[in-house]
Amino acid sequence: MRIAVTGSIATDHLMTFPGRFADQLVADQLHTVSLSFLVDNLDVRRGGVGANICFGMGQLGTGPILVGAAGSDFDEYRAWLDRHGVDTASVRISEVLHTARFVCTTDADHNQIGSFYTGAMSEARQIELKSVADRVGGLDLVVIGADDPEAMLRHTEECRSRAIPFAADFSQQIARMDGDEIRILLDGAAYLFSNEYEKGLIESKTGWTDAEILARVGHRVTTLGSQGVRIEAAGKETIEVGCPEEEAKIDPTGVGDAFRAGFLSGLSWGVDHERAAQVGCMLATLVIETLGTQEYTLRRAHFMERFTKAYGHEAASEVHAHLS
């Protein structure tokens, strides 16, 4: 099964200020702030929802196709993804813009000052999925993740016109989208991904009830944080899958992307939705135990040991046949 993942490609530049921002602010001068903070450290991490999902799928050996836009500074990041089993040949490289990046400084009170530079992400709207499909011999599923909003709309319409199954996954972009855009992006999707809060926001913005949305999508996949995931489809029994026990809770960033990577890998293997969700929850657990969205290592024996403990020998036997 050939799965293409469209979505943002970015780097996070994270800095720590040992003092307090509040101590540097003068109450009657807030209209003309000019501040510079001497920070202790700089942590540069790879990110972007499209790249994060593809990294996880690459770790599971399912050969994802990353579709997005980056700058000429993407070479090192591309090499990293290539080494971890991701097909990056369909990434558009901008001639004038840098790869998107998030720059954030955190103070001793965990207050943050951050900026997001969209950069080359704005050129994702110029990517045509037909050229991707022609290069790899066809696409069985396109995941339309958070990206340049115009790109998300274009990819969705192209999937419909070319009869390519697609998954709607708005995540961070849902806050800036209106009801009309969300209705366009989800109508006819094979899968609709969201967390529980986003689920309510989708219903509020579209004006559609849960039942009406279920009638418009194949399956609705809702992540529930530490409670796992719920998978619904019109006229079918709801599937609920819990999370494996965590060894530590280090950083929740990228956990949703990891779940999607595992779930999509399960679809690629041809296992049922319950089993795919179990793989997703196991991979998400590895990410929450790691600092950074792509810093975990999938050691297959360790993965299977914990998967077996969480979901039993029958489930593990089915998954092991694909992982090995």
Image: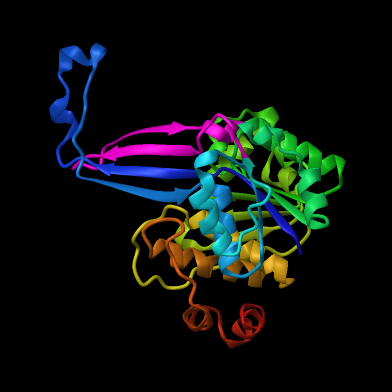
Q: Is-magenta flag for residue 118?
A: yes
The segment highlighted magenta reads 93-122
Task: Provide residue 214's location: percent of width, then percent of height.
Answer: 73, 49
* Residue 277 visible, this angle: yes
- Is 131 left, or right, of 304 in this rendering? right
Depth order, front residue of 279/187: 279
Task: Provide residue 165's location: percent of width, then percent of height.
Answer: 79, 51
Q: Is residue 61 above or below residue 144?
A: below
Q: Quadrant of the N terminus?
A: bottom right
Q: Residue at x 35, y 63 (%)?
A: 249
Name the image quarter holding residue 93: top right
Depth order, front residue of 227/150: 150
Q: Residue at x 55, y 57 (%)?
A: 81
Task: Provide residue 87's location: percent of width, then percent of height.
Answer: 65, 57
Name the image quarter holding residue 290: bottom left
Depth order, front residue of 36/180: 36
Q: Residue at x 66, y 30 (%)?
A: 179
Name the image quarter holding residue 9: top right
Q: Quadrant of the C terminus?
A: bottom right
Q: Is residue 123 above or below residue 189?
A: above
